Amino acid sequence: MTPTRRPPRRDPYQLFHIQSDFAAGLAPHQIAAKHGLPLPAVLRIIRRRKDERLLNPFNLRQGAVRSRGATQLYWVGYIAAAGRLFLQGSVPTLVLTVDRRDTDHVTTMIDDLCTGHPTCEWCESSRDGLQAYVRDRELAQMLAEWGAPGADPSEGSVPVALIPSSLLSHFVRGYLEGGRGMPPFGRRHVPLSHSAVRHIALEGPKEFLAGLNAALSKHAGTSAGDIRARRNGLAILTYRGRAAARIVQFAYRGAERSLPRTASLRHPEEPSRSRNGAGSSTR
């Protein structure tokens, strides 16, 4: 049973501005006064993390570490789509709803993101199917700073505007692959090429999807998608036709981490022109 009382979640944009103020030379008490927060809260926000490999939005925008962000942003996207972060209790818990074909992928995630002594337990949910319960304090702190969804999935929103444009494709790929049950990966078979993808549906908070839609229009060169509200408090962002294919092509450009079963999209089998002058195509 999920406890009804949950600790407050900080706005990722506010966390970013607090850390920016501290880097600019403001003292903690000045930051507290500027943002209307208790001094202990500010001190918790600006303290250095034990595992400095895990980058929050402020860290990631520093040029010296940006090269390390591709794999982490893939996982932030995957977790934002497939996970829920529960911060209450003695140990924060990340709950991932996982396709049965992808259990090894969770092990890869733990290897990539956790350096301490994380635990992972599996259970079967009557509503959601197979779930992984991952417990690691440092991972939970990083995910909270990225706005990972909580017990109420509508209360978390990843700050898309803070993702460097050079790393956006990795986040989008993770979000696509974490969207279990949503096209194009909700089907039994993965498309063999980018052009074979004709429909994409992304679920999430409406504000987040609006930001993602704008970012994809700018950086992936696609037309705007259609956003519609759902009864569960979330919304669906839909792309069809060429726009869907173009987003997949964008997401798998320079892929460093992805589901093993999406290898066909990392190395798509696109048709090529034959050289016999007949104008036919071969594979």
Image (cartoon, rainbow, N blue to C red):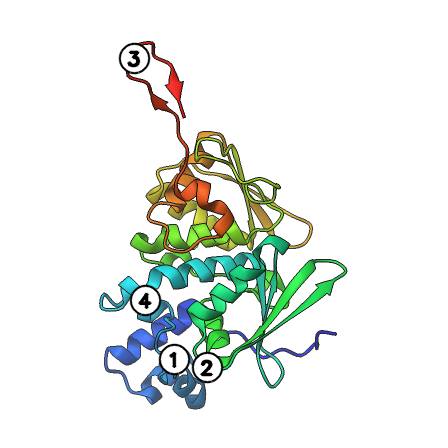
Query: What type is the residue that disc 2 sits on?
Result: Gly
Q: Residue at x 39, y 25 (%)?
A: 271
Calculate the distance from the C-alpha at mark 2 to the C-alpha at mark 4.
21 Å
Asked if the residue at tag 2 contacts the one at tag 1, i.e. Cβ–Cβ closer than 8 Å, the answer is yes
Which labelled disc corresponds to residue 85?
none
Q: Position of residue 72 (x, y in %)?
A: 40, 64
Cα distance in 3D space between marks 3 and 2: 59 Å
Residue picked out by circle 4: 60
What is the CA distance from the residue labelled 1 to the residue labelled 2? Answer: 9 Å
* Residue 56, horizontal then vertical, whole percent: 38, 70
- Relative to 241, say whether 202 is above or below: below
Q: How many marks?
A: 4
**Which residue type carries mark 1?**
Asp
Lower position in the chain sequence, tag 3 or tag 1: 1
| Residue wearing tag 1 | 51
Tag shown at residue 116:
2
- Say which quadrant the N terminus sits in: bottom right
Instruction: Name the residue nearer the viewer: 102 or 135.
Output: 102
- Callout 2: helix, strand or loop? loop
Give me the residue at 53% from left, 63% from top: 106
Say what amino acid the circle numbered 4 marks. Leu
Going from N to C along the chain, the mark reached first, 4 or 1, is 1
